[in-house]
Amino acid sequence: MKLTYNKHEKLKSQKTIEKLFLDGQSVSAYPLRLVYLKHGDSRKVGVSVSKRNFKRAVDRIRIKRLLREAYRLNKPVLINNEVNDYTLMILYISKDMPDFELINTKMKALLTKFLSK
């Protein structure tokens, strides 16, 4: 199984994002929060970091990279449980700069919490 995060898997549609935040449910494992919505399409995933918490763009971009990489490595958890028709948005909600080990362990916890719901 390839551990990739391809173009067709990225959440880009503004309408879908708005619908996700209006009608979606959420689960969190601090410092991560997952907003999800059952959608008829294939699985789409987006990541976001608040500009309020991180003023510098380089910090936001670094955290987004870490989030995407942690998702990419832990994606088999979703694939093995056949979660293919959801739209997901992963948010970083802390004000502290993270390291990859923290993000990776919290991503595992977040995805398992999502699967249990």
Image: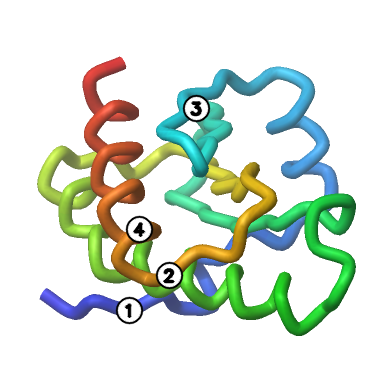
Do tag 4 and tag 2 residues touch (Cβ < 8 Å)? yes
Three-letter residue code for mark 3: Lys
**In terms of sequence position, does the residue under pointer 3 or pointer 2 come before the other?**
3
- The image position of residue 97, as x and y in percent, is 59, 65
Q: Which residue is mark 1?
A: 4
Q: Nearer the viewer, mark 1 or mark 3?
A: 1
Q: Is 78 in front, or is 33?
A: 33
Q: Disc number at residue 72?
A: none
Q: Is 76 in front, or is 49?
A: 49
**In terms of sequence position, does the residue under pointer 1 or pointer 3 come before the other?**
1
**In terms of sequence position, does the residue under pointer 1 or pointer 4 come before the other?**
1
Instruction: Give the Cα separation between the discs numbered 1 and 2.
Output: 21 Å
Q: Which residue is mark 4?
A: 102
Q: Secondary structure at mark 3?
A: strand
Q: Is residue 111 left or right of residue 31?
A: left
Instruction: Give the Cα separation between the discs numbered 4 and 3.
Output: 28 Å
Three-letter residue code for mark 1: Thr
Q: Which residue is mark 2?
A: 99
Q: In the rendered image of this protein, does residue 29 appear above or below residue 31? A: above
Q: Nearer the viewer, mark 4 or mark 3?
A: 4
Asked which colour scheme the image uses, the reply is rainbow
- The image position of residue 71, as x and y in percent, is 37, 61
Q: Secondary structure at mark 1?
A: loop
Q: Which residue is mark 3?
A: 38
Q: Secondary structure at mark 2?
A: loop
Do tag 1 and tag 2 residues touch (Cβ < 8 Å)? no
Q: Secondary structure at mark 4?
A: helix
Three-letter residue code for mark 4: Leu
